[in-house]
Image (cartoon, grey):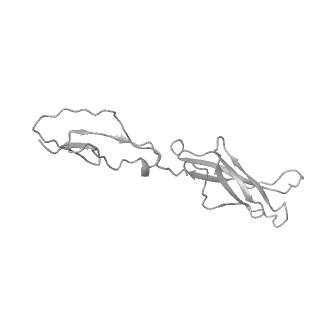
Amino acid sequence: MENDNTVLLNPPLFALDKDAPLRYAGEICGFRIHGAGVPFEAVILDKATGEGLIRAKEPVDCEAHKEHTFTIQAYDCGEGPDGANTKKSHKATVHVRVNDVNEFAPVFVEKLYRVAVTEGKLYDRILRVEAIDGDCSPQYSQICYYEILTPNIPFLIDNDGNIENTEK
């Protein structure tokens, strides 16, 4: 989730060691994330079951990066045949999609819209105004409708920002 450090994995993060149920040798001691500048860390929750989680080191921003892809590797607590090296799993790819939150309000493209019209004439479209929203997802960045706030004026605005007059 954007601006949060929670990463919900599907499926959950688990690593298994064929040395189990041997104490230490059959346990997972941790995970390593591979990739430059990856804003996530992997944490072991239970060495015996190999359960872990991935969390953001700092809140992620959908507007900066909608997605992150990196590889992860588990390593066990045992010693390798040479007595020194832990054994590592194959690398698995993790793809994180950042869910957007509605943090930006719409803003008009122009600060001032100006148009001249001829008196006594009805127009289908006098002017089109446009607003944009800085959120990264269509769900939160789409402008749904426009509204004229000034009361008792002879104008209408449609959902696309087109302004028309209602009186000559």
Which residue is most to the right?
Answer: 83
Look at the image and tell me whether residue 118 can be seen: yes
Position above or below: 40 against 120 = below
Image coordinates for residue 115, horizontal then vertical, percent: 22, 33
Q: Residue 27 appears in which quarter of the rendering?
A: bottom right
Image coordinates for residue 112, horizontal then vertical, percent: 30, 32
Which residue is most to the front?
Answer: 151
Q: Is residue 125 left or right of residue 133?
A: left
Q: Residue at x 28, y 34 (%)?
A: 113
Number of marks in picture: 0
Q: Residue 10 appears in which quarter of the rendering?
A: bottom right
Q: Is residue 153 left or right of residue 60?
A: left
Q: Which of 150/87 is in front?
A: 150
Q: Residue at x 26, y 48 (%)?
A: 158
Position above or below: 21 against 1 = below
Q: Which of 61/78 is in front?
A: 61
Look at the image and tell me whether residue 90 can be seen: no
Q: Is residue 116 left or right of residue 95?
A: left
Question: Which quadrant of the figure contains the C terminus?
Answer: top left
Which residue is most to the bottom?
Answer: 21
Image coordinates for residue 64, horizontal then vertical, percent: 53, 41
Image coordinates for residue 75, horizontal then vertical, percent: 77, 54
